[in-house]
């Protein structure tokens, strides 16, 4: 299902204030991981791009506006600006998610961690921190 359709309502609900701090951290981590998944190595056509994971290419499929926005955002080497550009994109989300207090900073921090340490180590650290604070356990 396209990112545009799948995520829009979910993020509106999740950041409406009813989630716990631990689940919000996991949600913002998931969003950063999604952005990494959408990191293109090349465009295939206007609705598809290729990504790479462990030296294997995969095809990224989504709505044209999501593919275009994410490909353009990844052209920026500054992860803070990349996240801001994607979160601000109302065509993808139906709203400006950059206005959600703390979302930009949280997603940016997770994105930096994933890019520096990898997804597994970053997630493990997040789960350990969350568990030590009485949150989500693994």
Image (cartoon, grey):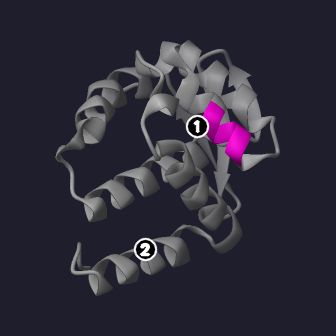
Q: Secondary structure at mark 2?
A: helix
The image shows residue 115 at horizontal and vertical percentages of 67, 62
User: How many numbered circles does the render carry?
Assistant: 2
Would you say residue 82 sits in the magenta stretch? yes
In the image, what residue occupies the spot 43% across and 40% down?
101
Magenta part, dominant SS: helix
Q: Position of residue 54 (x, y in %)?
A: 65, 64
Marks 1,2: beta carbons within 8 A: no
Q: Nearer the viewer, mark 1 or mark 2?
A: 2
Distance from disc 1 to disc 2, alpha carbons, whole Å, reads 28 Å
The residue tagged 2 is 126
Report the residue at 60% width, 51% height from top.
108
Above or below residue 39? Residue 62 is above
Quadrant holding the N terminus: top left
Image height check: is 6 above or below 24? above
For label 1, the SS is strand
Q: Quadrant of residue 49?
A: top right
Q: Residue at x 56, y 43 (%)?
A: 35
- Residue 59's disc is 1
Residue 114, position as x, y percentages in the image: 60, 64
Looking at the image, residue 132 sits to the left or right of residue 110; the answer is left
Q: Residue drawn 29% across and 29% down?
A: 12
In the rendered structure, which disc, 1 or 2, sits on the residue that comes first in sequence?
1
Against 58, residue 96 (above or below) is above
Left/right of residue 49 with respect to residue 4 in the rendered view: right
- The segment highlighted magenta reads 80-84
């Amino acid at each position: 299902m396209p990112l545009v359709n799948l995520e829009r309502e979910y993020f509106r609900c999740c950041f409406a204030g009813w989630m716990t701090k631990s689940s919000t951290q996991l949600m913002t981590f998931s969003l950063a991981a999604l952005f990494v998944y959408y990191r293109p190595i090349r465009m295939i056509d206007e609705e598809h791009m290729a990504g790479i994971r462990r030296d294997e290419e995969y095809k990224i499929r989504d709505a044209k506006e999501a593919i275009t926005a994410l490909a353009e955002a990844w052209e920026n080497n500054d992860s803070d600006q990349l996240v801001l550009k994607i979160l601000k994109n109302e065509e993808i989300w139906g709203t400006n998610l950059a206005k959600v207090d703390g979302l930009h900073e949280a997603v940016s921090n997770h994105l930096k961690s994933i890019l520096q340490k990898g997804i597994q180590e970053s997630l493990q650290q997040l789960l350990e921190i969350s568990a030590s604070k009485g949150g989500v356990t693994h």
